[in-house]
Image (spheres, rainbow, N blue to C red):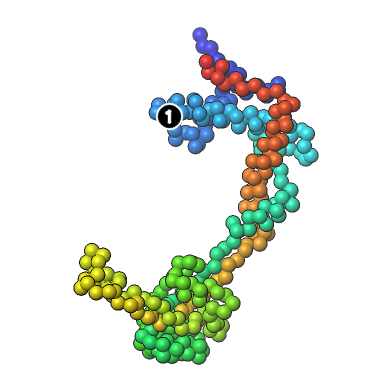
Amino acid sequence: PFQSDNPVVARVGDFDIRAADLNRNTYLNPQIQGLINPNFADLIVNSVKPNVLTQMIDEELAYQGSSELDGAFAGTRAAVAQSALAEVTDEQIRTYYRENRAAYTEPASALTTRVNLPDAASARSFREALTGADTLDAEAVSVAAEAAGGSVEQLGNVAPGSQPEAIDAALFNFDTGMTRLGSSGFEVSRVLTIAAPSAAQTGGAQTGGAQTGGGAAPPPQEQFVVLVAARTPERVRPLQEVRTQVEQAALAQARNTAGQEWLGGLRERIPVANLLASAQT
């Protein structure tokens, strides 16, 4: 009393792709399973399924064309197809790495302590105390800052462009920016003079964003700042360290260029018939 209907939805050469194969590839896909409810039924049938079928046709073309390539392929039809589409040479990997080196570059950073001092003389005194110290740690910096009448502000791990221009230039000019403090791993900047907004400009004497009293805003105050930092320069990760990631990226690029050209050539020689619309009807 039972009958089954499993029509052909595509034909690649002599190979038939049937509705059950298409349904299996569509509805067992973890990304699609979250859409399986009545609200998305039309979307799956009219959009998702045709795209899945196109991928299956390309896989079958690649499977049939793999016999023409150098090298041995083993596994399921899908595995052979992916292997045939995914060949990439060592030179292609090196070329991709050179052309996309920025993607494998670790930006510069600096674990930074900012010390604000009341005047230039105090700032110089603080800096001299650090350069003459036998050992240096966070406590020593705090003690020296307190002795000079300054306050310590931990900026954390700073990235380029995240601080005022003068601080950014001092931290990330690796040629002349800072002076190494013995073997501690820390460096100290020169005394920086930074324009800081006055209390009125920061909102201390504002009402609704307007200056009270009708007078002109006072000029910016000067802050005297010394930075203590453990800096890490920009680093390009060598190819041997990122080879796996580079190879995967190069493979993806190859699939989108040479792979599509190869499949286009196969389509000219292997008959392809997409019968999904008539099968659904």
Q: Is residue 25 visible?
A: no
Disc 1 designates what residue? 40
Instruction: Please report the residue visible at 70 percent of the width from the left and 28 percent of the height from the top.
Output: 267
Residue 21, image x, y percentages: 58, 25
Residue 115, image x, y percentages: 41, 80
Residue 131, image x, y percentages: 50, 88
Instruction: Please report the residue visible at 53 percent of the width from the left and 80 percent of the height from the top.
Output: 178
Instruction: Please report the residue visible at 38 percent of the width from the left and 84 percent of the height from the top.
Output: 117
User: Which image quadrant for residue 236?
Assistant: bottom right
> Relative to the observer, which residue lies in front, 66 or 200?
200
Q: Is residue 223 visible?
A: yes
Instruction: Please report the residue visible at 46 percent of the width from the left and 79 percent of the height from the top.
Output: 227
How many numbered marks are there?
1
> Relative to the observer, which residue lies in front, 121 or 32?
121
| Disc 1 element | helix
Q: Is residue 39 above or below residue 129?
A: above
Residue that protrudes farthest toward the left in the picture: 213
118 to the left or right of 78:
left
